[in-house]
Each structure stands twice: as C-alpha cells, then as structure tokens.
Amino acid sequence: MTDTAPQTSTPAPLKTLKIDFVSDVVCPWCVVGLGGLETALERLEPEGIAADIAFQPFELNPDMAPEGEGIVEHIGRKYGSTPEQSAVNREMIRARAAEAWKNLKSPISGGVGFDMRMGADSRIWNTFDAHRLLHWAHETAPDKQKALKQALFTAHFTENRNLTDAGVLTQAAEAAGLDRAEAAEVLASGRYAQAVRQAEQLWRSRGINSVPAVVVEGKYLISGGQPAEAFEQALRQIAKEA
C-alpha cells in the first residue's frame, strides 16, 4: 500500500465583497487606510474572504487653484494648525503609513512600508484630472485601477510631484500598466469629467463628507484610516452577514 501525501488547496471564496473605496489622492489618511485594508484582506484570504475594490472620487479641495498651495499654509488656513503642529502631524502620519504597508506583498511598499516624504515645502494640488484617469482605468482596465491609485499616491507623497501636470499623470498611468498615449488623450479631451462630477455628488448625497470612506456591499461604512485589525474584524463579520 502506497502512502499518499495530504493535498492542500486554497478554500473557495466564502464571499467576494464589493468594496467602494472613496478617497482622494492627496489624502494621507487614505494611504494609511488602503494599507490597512489590503493587509486585512491578505490575512482573510485563508478564510476564503476576498474583495472587489473600486476606487471612487472625492476631492478634499475641489476649488484648489492649478498652482496648488504649500502644505503648511494650506493646513494652517484650513485647520488652524501652526507650522510646528503641522510638522508633528506629518511625522505621525508618515509613521502610520510606513506601518500600514510594511508587511504587504504589494510592490508599492517592497516590504518596508510606504515611503511618505511630505515636508514643509510640499504642496497640495487639484486632483480632478487624477480622478478622471482613475475613472478611465475603472472603465477600460479595472484590474489596473488599484495600480494607478498606488502610482498616484507615490507621485504625490513620495516624489512630491505636481498632480496637475499631464506628464506626471500619464507617467503614473504608464507605471500602472496603462496606455500612456490614451491617458494623454483622456486628459486633453476632458473625457469623464461629467461622470466624475456625478460620482462625487452621489457619494456626498450618501453622507460621505470625509475620507477615506470604505463602503462594503453598498451599505456597511468603515470610516477613516483604520488599522488592519479593525478592517479584518469588520470584513469578517460582514462576510458572515452578507
């Protein structure tokens, strides 16, 4: 009689959850939140819990001028923070972002965490065109939308690049595996402008006034840049109920 080695297999998904990740690409807590969500999903994979994530638009500063605004001036004007308070907050968020992405398999972190380099000379940009590209990615190559989101995060927070610059945006699209020439055409033509405005209005009409807002199965809301443990617990419970 021949011994047969036990066979193991990945369990079939108990539930593939539909997740709308409502966020802005200049929102540092959205970087933290996405890292926590992705880490939770990796931990839940052995339990057969998966997710289909769509990134939805939200502009923190829809009236931001094309030339942007210095981060210290912007935070001081918007929240009343002093330069010293702003510096302390940047360091705290930098540490949280690095921790949130530290153990992910995602190439954005390389196993060492997200590299957030916001400094006193960083700027905040208008992000409408970035959201148009994200909408285009979701419409034409949804499997690459997350890579584009990550590339835009890197362009802004790690490389401190101008997110209103078409060259910066098309380079991010190319880094995500999308066609750079088509991305340039989308930007030049104004395509998807109305669709993005409508999506922004839709999420605001549903009560989303701050980001990140993680909407699961269209009805469960997880707010803020939560740690992986919070996402893991919530998604496990939702998967049982859904």
Image: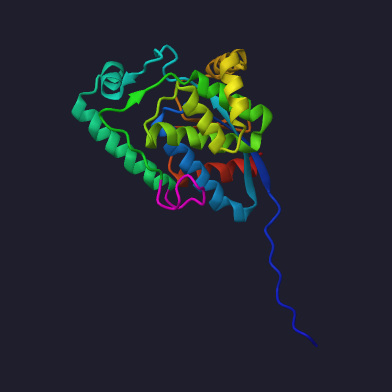
Q: Is residue 235 left or right of residue 79?
A: right
Q: Where is residue 216 in the image (x, y as percent from the top left)?
A: 59, 34
Q: Which residue is drawn at 56% across and 21% down?
A: 132
Q: Where is residue 61 in the image (x, y as percent from the top left)?
A: 41, 17
Q: In this view, does 30 lie above or below 201?
A: below
Q: Please say whether residue 22 is one of the residues in the magenta stretch.
A: no
Classify the position of the N terminus by image quarter.
bottom right
- Return the residue nearer the eye: 128 or 40: 128
Q: Please say whether residue 109 is one of the residues in the magenta stretch.
A: yes
Q: Main secondary structure of the magenta part?
A: loop
Q: Which residue is drawn at 65% across and 52% down?
A: 48
Q: Which residue is drawn at 62% across and 29% down?
A: 137
The picture quadrant where one finds residue 147 is top right
The answer, for residue 52, to whether it is visible in the render is yes
- Return the residue nearer the eye: 117 or 222: 117
Classify the position of the C terminus by image quarter.
top right
Q: Is residue 184 left or right of residue 84?
A: right
Q: Residue at x 50, y 27 (%)?
A: 169
The answer, for residue 225, to whether it is visible in the render is no
- Return the residue nearer the eye: 154 or 20: 154
The picture quadrant where one finds residue 27 is top left
Bounds of the magenta span?
Answer: 102-113
Q: How many labels does the image show?
A: 0
Q: Which residue lies furthest to the bottom in this view?
A: 1
Q: Position of residue 175 (x, y in %)?
A: 54, 38
